[in-house]
Image (spheres, rainbow, N blue to C red):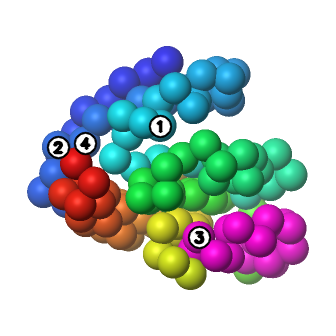
Amino acid sequence: MNLAKMDICKCRCQFWDIGGSMKNLWERYYPDSDAVILVVDMNDLDDLILQEILTQVEDHIPILIFGNRKPSVGPEEQSAKKKTMGLPPQFAAAESSFRMKFVEGSAKTGEGVKAAMEWLIPFAKRQQQLHG
């Protein structure tokens, strides 16, 4: 498990990386979270566990799904994969209710990270004020 603290979008953020090997512990972290970020490999979308996360995370907690693109695969191919990846119906409902957002980018180059955090942090702050 890795821990990182950083200032992003005028907010002090604390990130816990509790990778896939610790999946059985994920739900223990959700109640104390102001937001959930799921980083998925756009080259391996079959392992997406979104439906399980949606049932475990409280309705007021925003969820950011960051589709990490590898440099070997272009944005056009990635977008085609997103359209055909068979997301559960809850994804469309959650995304349209603004509880969830899917952002494509590259963790290696930083592409898409700022935009993702600019959506997530204000949302998480609002939800924290409303739900304490």
Most common secondary structure along the magenta stretch: helix
Q: Is residue 79 magenta?
A: yes
Whether residue 79 sits left or right of residue 39 in the image: it is right
Figure quadrant of residue 90: bottom right
Query: What's under tag 4, amino acid-wise?
Result: Cys
Q: Which mark is residue 13?
A: 4
Disc 4/disc 2 C-alpha distance (Å):
4 Å
Q: Which mark is residue 94?
A: 3
Front position in the image: 42 or 62:
62
Label 4–label 2 contact, CB within 8 A: yes
- Magenta segment, which residues? 77-95
Disc 3/disc 4 C-alpha distance (Å):
24 Å
The structure residue drawn at horizontal position 47% and vertical position 30%, both measured from the top left corner, is 29
The structure residue drawn at horizontal position 34% and vertical position 47%, both measured from the top left corner, is 34
Q: Is residue 4 magenta?
A: no
* Residue to which mark 2 is pinned: 12
Disc 2/disc 1 C-alpha distance (Å):
19 Å
Disc 2/disc 3 C-alpha distance (Å):
26 Å
